[in-house]
Image: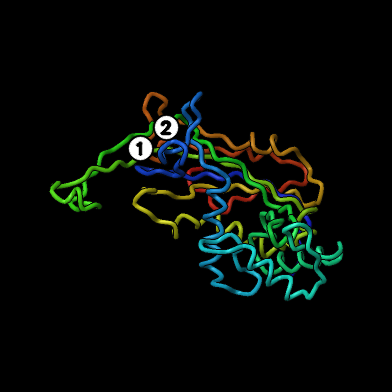
Amino acid sequence: MTVLDRRCDFVLYFDVKDGNPNGDPDAGNMPRFDPETGQGLVTDVCIKRKIRNYVEIAKSGKEGYRIYVREGTVLNREHDEAFKRTEIKTKKVGNQLKPADDAGRDKVRRDMCGRFFDIRTFGAVMSTQTDAGQVRGPVQLTFARSEHPVFSRDVAITRMAVTNEVDADKERTIGRKHTVAYGLYRGHGFVSPSLAEKTGFSQSDLELLWEALVSMFEHDRSAARGLMATRALVVFDHGCKLGRAHSHDLFSRVRTELRDPAKPPRDFSDYKLTLDGAELQGVMTTVPLAAGFA
C-alpha cells in the first residue's frame, strides 16, 4: 500500500434530532454542552468510536483492519501476542515487561500498526504492564461543537416492570431520558503525512476514513441517540507534505447560516452552508458529502 504523502484538513458536519449525541457521565449522562455559551459538545473520542465501529463492520476482521480499542478487549493480551509474533527479546522492569532494546520496540510498534487500523490512524498509548510503547497517529480530531445553543430536555419515562423484589407492589417505575431537540454539530480534523510515514497510514486508509465519516451513523442506531446523520464533509487536500495554507484559514471558508434567525433550528433544512471556492494555490477542495451547500 502507498503511504500517504500529503497533508489534508477537513470539516465535518453532523446533526441530532430528539436524541443524546454524547452523554456526560459526570452529569448524569446528560448531553455535553458548554455552560458559558449553551453550545452542545461531542468529544473526539465519541467520533473515533463510531469510526472504529464502522471499520470493524466494513472490513469484518480483514487482515490489517482489526480494531485495537474494542468492547471486551484485554489490551495487554494484544501486546503479549505482538511480542510472540515478532519474537523480540524482552526484559522485566519493575512490574512491566518491555522490549530489550529500541530495535525490538520499533519492531513491535510496526507490527501493531500493520495489524490494527485504529492504531495506525489515531495512534495509541500501549505502555501498559506489557509495554509496547506509544504511537502518535496521523489523524487527529477536535471536539465537535453545535453551531447554535442546544436545550437539553429531561423527559420522564415509565416502565411497567420493576427491578427489585421490594418494589413488586408498585404498578410502574419512573426513569429519565435526556434529549436535544435539534443540534447541528461541526468538528475539524487533520491528517499528517509525516506521522503517516511512521505508522504506515496509506491512501486506501484515508479513503476508508472518508467512507467511515460519511456513513458511521448508519450503523450506530440507538433509541437514546435519536436521529443522527453526517450532513457534510469538506476535505482540503494540500497536495504536498508541508501544506500550502494554514488550517484555520481553510476552515474559515466553510460557513453556516440560519435561513430564519428568528426561528430556533429544528431540522437541517433550517441551515444554509456555504463554501468559499475561491482559487487557492495548490489546495484542492473536495466535498464527498455535500448536502445543504448553497
Seen at 38% across and 31% down, the residue is 151
Mark 2: secondary structure: loop
Q: Is residue 47 left or right of residue 182?
A: right
Task: Tell me, yes or no, whether the two marked residues, 2 and 1, touch with CB atoms within 8 Å.
Answer: yes
Name the residue beneath numbered marker 2: 150
Q: Who is closer to the viewer here, 35 or 235?
A: 35
Amino acid type of the residue tagged 1 in the rendering: Ala
Residue 67, image x, y percentages:
59, 64
What crowding class fits label 2: few (fewer than 14 Cα within 10 Å), some (14-19), or many (20 or more)?
Answer: many
* Disc on the earlier residue, 2 or 1: 2
Quadrant assignment, res 62: bottom right
Quadrant assignment, res 183: top left
Seen at 67% across and 57% down, the residue is 121
Q: Which mark is residue 8?
A: none
Q: Which mark is residue 181?
A: 1
Q: Quadrant of the N terminus?
A: bottom right
Residue 205, image x, y percentages:
66, 63
As drawn, 234 above or below 271: below
Residue 82, image x, y percentages:
71, 70
Marks 2 and 1, Cα distance to the nearest angstrom?
8 Å
Amino acid type of the residue tagged 2 in the rendering: Val
Seen at 64% across and 74% down, the residue is 63
Q: Who is closer to the viewer here, 25 or 99?
A: 99
